[in-house]
Image (cartoon, rainbow, N blue to C red):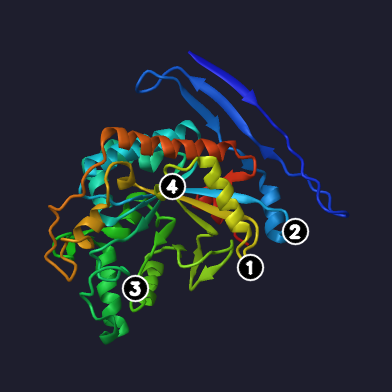
Amino acid sequence: MMRRNTLFVLCSLVLVTGVILVLFILVTSESRSSSSTDGEEILQVTPNEVEEVVLDEVISGVIPDETPVYVATFTLNIQDFSYPELSASILERLIQTHEQRNLPVEVFLTTTMVDVFPRDYPDLWEQLTSSSVVDLSYHFRPPVPYHNVAAETVSWSSLSWDEAYEIVYAYETHGLDLVTGEPTQEEGSIAKLTSLLGHPPTCVGAAAGAGAAKVVHQVFADLGARCIVDNSSFTNLGEYLETFWVRPQHVDVKLFEQLHTPAEEILVAAKQAATEIPSATTPYFLNVKMHDNDFFAQNSAWTTVYLARGARRDGPPYDTSLKSPLLSAVEQEKVYEAYVSMLDAALADPELVIMNLPQIETLLP
């Protein structure tokens, strides 16, 4: 049995003399469904959206910078090879949670998860690739030798451009052996994700070391990537790095570090911090970030195997039998509840428009 209650709220914003603009904010469209996996009612809402014309006017400078517009993005970094069954389970639950709220989410996959999910969890893979709220992107982690915290197994400064390019290209077109740190003979990485999707993923998280960064970027560009993540500093909408547009971000909201802080307080602080950044311009972008392992383990698999005390940090062979301790069932549920609280707080915030990267790309000047 379905009950639907629809609430439309029209808010107007009066600007300075001589500029009369109306800011339409479509607040919420709520419905309740009596069916769920656990028999409880699930709240279904539509995310609040700022009309595209308003964002266009902000970007074009018609609306002055002192009129703040905030864009929130939700990012899930999926990477935990130690507990793939738990990674798959929580990702499925999170997608359902986003779908119930019609809330966009960006999912970044490592090469290992690009191998594991289609092969071992086909239903999840179908959900990932068919969901109207999910966009897939790509990132790499150790033991690839060009990650900025990986073991220094390659002397990049001693290689020619062509030699370095060949190494990176081999990694980004093949799978990854987690024990040897070498590329496999099978198709993998961003090339495989592109094949599976039928197009390159929207964005790449390219946290490369300084010695390899330029060649890594060139490989990604040649493999069709058009957006890149740069967490080294804030980024306004419309900034570019080499051939890439850079994901706009003013505040990186690391929710996994603030799980005991009320979501509303986190958002207020993030918005305030964004407006105080010198040279930052509206719209201000808040990126709310979580990792799959945050929901079930004390540490990530790649940290445990490649970086933590007791791990072999100077090179292969790596011990993939090392596993992070798990959170208790109660702790796991509390993390999930904190994430849901953040989703609902963002949806209830009339100043926020919630987007994923393909939607943001349409705003580029």
Image quarter hosting the C terminus: bottom right
Within-10-Å neighbours for mark 3: few <14, some 14–19, many 20+: some
Residues at circles 3 and 2 in contact by the CB criterion of under 8 Å: no
Identify the mark nearer the N-term, 1 or 4. Answer: 4
Q: Is residue 156 above or below residue 235?
A: below
Q: Is residue 363 visible?
A: no
Check disc 2 and report the residue beneath it.
64
The amino acid type of the residue labelled 2 equals Pro
Q: CA distance from mark 1 to mark 4?
A: 27 Å
**Residue at the image position 49 percent from the left and 25 percent from the top:** 43
Q: Nearer the viewer, mark 1 or mark 4?
A: 4
Check disc 3 and report the residue beneath it.
209
Residue closest to the far right? 18
Q: Residue 249 location, x and y as percent?
A: 53, 59
Residues at circles 3 and 4 in contact by the CB criterion of under 8 Å: no
Is 131 on the left-hand or right-hand side of 282? Answer: left
Secondary element at tag 2: loop
Secondary element at tag 3: loop
Check disc 4 and report the residue beneath it.
258
Using the rendered view, name the quadrant where residue 223 is placed: bottom left
The amino acid type of the residue labelled 4 equals Gln
